[in-house]
Image (tube, coloured by chain):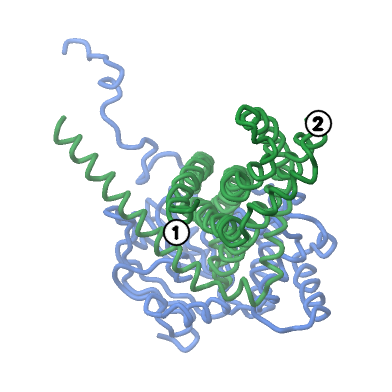
């Protein structure tokens, strides 16, 4: 019994290490074979439509509601300290620094990441990737790399749109519904949001999340066992792993970016 | 090795992990021939095609295609060789997100700089050859199993390869599609000067069209010959296979403990 447990633990550890190694090789191969994704940029644009444009609805609607909630909660809290005029600052900083990249990342992982894994997994299960190899076309260059770059390019754009919609939501609730002064709302926001420290760092975060989510989604699809069960398991793993990766990376990036800022 | 030998497999062994699949296979395909590789499911027929296509490397022995040792080629040389090969996968493996036309045009667009007008003409010619010119605009999801197989065949011959490999081309087809597919393999081989390697367990259909047959069992070639020789063969394995007998050298039952023991029964008097 003890021997079996130790054997099982050993096997799992070896498989885990092997998988990490394979993922690292996969990532390097994807970068090395990225030439096609740029030489034939139409391939990447096509994937940007599927991963980016088709994620727009969920991103825009979620951003609007998150901003509206921020407006309500922020006003209620700030009113206690008599600082309701700083509502614009609160909404904008919360969105561009944290909520925009993180929530857009989580939504992107669920909407686009799962779709990428399912598509690549099914292409593998139905031998489409093997067929491509036999036609002397490298699937990493032709299928994987364009999807990777499409995700990396789409993610910051989606996060920016999420933040923009969130600010609009905060304005609708704070200014139009509650009655915060419109001039104060915008001027406070403009004076307290720094391009480099806040907006640029938010963009960097969303690019890092884009790299992490698309890499996990593509790897899970490529490594999925070629069965219905295998593809469904890989899709679930994509959403779970990439969501956790977004949250963990957010903590690390925040610690580096905003440490010591006033 | 004859001058007209295209594929030569010499004492090839291969296994998945600790499980051996091929244990010293020898096989030769000459140019212009239709060769059938037969054997029961799981005997390593598809593995053999993957070895020829260079998707896996042999653990022992050599696989030569057009004089080149496939297992020893680097990635660029292997891709160059694959441009001269076509492969028909068991269920077609068509790209489901693009139309029939774009599937057949795929290799032409990837590997040539031909103008779109020329590509259009070539694609329509290939589709006409398999009788599906009228289906060019359809998506793969709108095709029947037999039609998908024929589109995949048109795609496999798009670059006029010297070798086409077919993985179970007759599996799951109705009798009409079965005959059509068989005739197409023979006709395309003859008219385009191809060499065809057909992996199948459909004896009756394949014996109608092939020049030579290899029977594979338990990782080795157990019998070979022309269609007539195979039909007349007295070897128990070949006889069972050709006549579709349930029991013989290939047992009906997967190895298992005694049936009575499994059901918890004891013999009377025991």
Q: Residue at x 38, y 59 (%)?
A: A22
Q: Which mark is nearer the camera, 2 or 1?
A: 2
Regarding residue B264, the answer to whether it shows in the image is yes
Circle on res. B168: none
Q: Secondary structure at mark 1?
A: helix
Q: Colour of chain B?
A: blue
The quarter of the displayed image where residue B94 is located: bottom right
Placement of A79 over or under B215, stated as above or below: above
x, y percentage for residue A123?
58, 54
Nearer-the-camera pick, B233 or A146: A146
Q: Quadrant of the N terminus of chain B?
A: bottom left
Which label sits on residue A177? 2
Q: Which chain is green?
A: A
In the image as oriented, which residue stretches furthest toward the top?
B269
Which label was assigned to residue B45? 1
Q: Is residue A15 left or right of residue A156?
A: left
């Amino acid at each position: 019994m003890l021997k079996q447990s130790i054997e099982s633990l050993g096997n799992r550890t070896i498989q885990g290490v092997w998988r990490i190694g394979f993922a690292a090789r996969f990532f390097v191969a994807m970068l090395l074979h990225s030439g096609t994704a740029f030489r034939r940029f139409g391939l990447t644009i096509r994937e940007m439509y599927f991963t980016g444009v088709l994620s727009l609805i969920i991103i825009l609607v979620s951003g609007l509601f998150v901003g509206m909630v921020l407006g309500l909660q922020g006003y209620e809290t700030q009113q206690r300290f008599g600082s309701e005029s700083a509502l614009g600052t609160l909404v904008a900083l919360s969105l561009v620094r944290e909520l925009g990249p993180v929530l857009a990342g989580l939504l992107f992982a669920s909407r686009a990441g799962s779709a990428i894994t399912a598509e690549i997994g099914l292409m593998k299960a139905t031998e489409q990737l093997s067929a491509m190899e036999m036609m002397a076309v490298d699937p990493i260059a032709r299928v994987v790399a364009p999807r990777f770059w499409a995700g990396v390019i789409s993610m910051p754009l989606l996060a920016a749109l999420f933040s923009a919609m969130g600010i609009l939501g905060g304005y609708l609730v704070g200014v139009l519904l509650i009655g915060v002064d419109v001039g104060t709302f915008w001027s406070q926001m403009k004076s307290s949001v720094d391009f480099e420290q806040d907006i640029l760092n938010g963009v960097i975060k969303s690019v890092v999340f884009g790299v992490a989510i698309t890499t996990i989604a593509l790897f899970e699809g490529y490594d999925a066992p070629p069965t219905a069960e295998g593809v469904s398991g890989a899709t679930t793993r994509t959403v779970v792993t990439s969501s956790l990766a977004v949250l963990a990376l957010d903590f690390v990036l925040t610690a580096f970016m905003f440490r010591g800022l006033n | 090795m004859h001058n007209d030998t295209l594929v030569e497999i010499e004492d090839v062994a291969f296994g998945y992990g600790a499980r051996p699949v091929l244990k010293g296979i020898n096989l030769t395909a000459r140019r212009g021939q239709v060769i059938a590789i037969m054997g029961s499911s799981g005997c390593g027929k598809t593995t053999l095609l993957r070895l020829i296509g260079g998707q896996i490397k042999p653990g022992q022995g050599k696989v030569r295609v057009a004089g080149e040792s496939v297992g020893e080629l680097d990635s660029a040389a292997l891709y160059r060789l694959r441009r001269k090969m076509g492969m028909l996968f068991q269920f077609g493996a068509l790209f489901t997100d693009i139309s029939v036309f774009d599937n057949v045009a795929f290799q032409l667009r990837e590997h040539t700089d031909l103008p779109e007008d020329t590509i259009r003409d070539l694609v329509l010619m290939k589709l006409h050859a398999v009788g599906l010119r009228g289906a060019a605009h359809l998506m793969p999801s709108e095709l029947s199993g037999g039609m998908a197989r024929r589109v995949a065949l048109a795609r496999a011959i798009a670059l006029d390869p010297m070798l086409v490999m077919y993985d179970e081309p007759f599996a799951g087809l109705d009798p009409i599609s079965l005959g059509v597919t068989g005739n197409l393999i023979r006709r395309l081989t003859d008219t385009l000067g191809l060499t065809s390697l057909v992996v199948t367990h459909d004896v009756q259909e394949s014996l109608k069209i092939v020049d030579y047959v290899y029977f594979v069992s338990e990782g080795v070639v157990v019998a070979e010959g022309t269609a007539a020789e195979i039909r007349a063969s007295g070897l128990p394995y070949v006889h069972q296979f050709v006549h579709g007998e349930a029991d013989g050298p290939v047992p009906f039952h997967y190895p298992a403990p005694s049936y009575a023991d499994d059901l918890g029964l004891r013999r009377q008097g025991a």
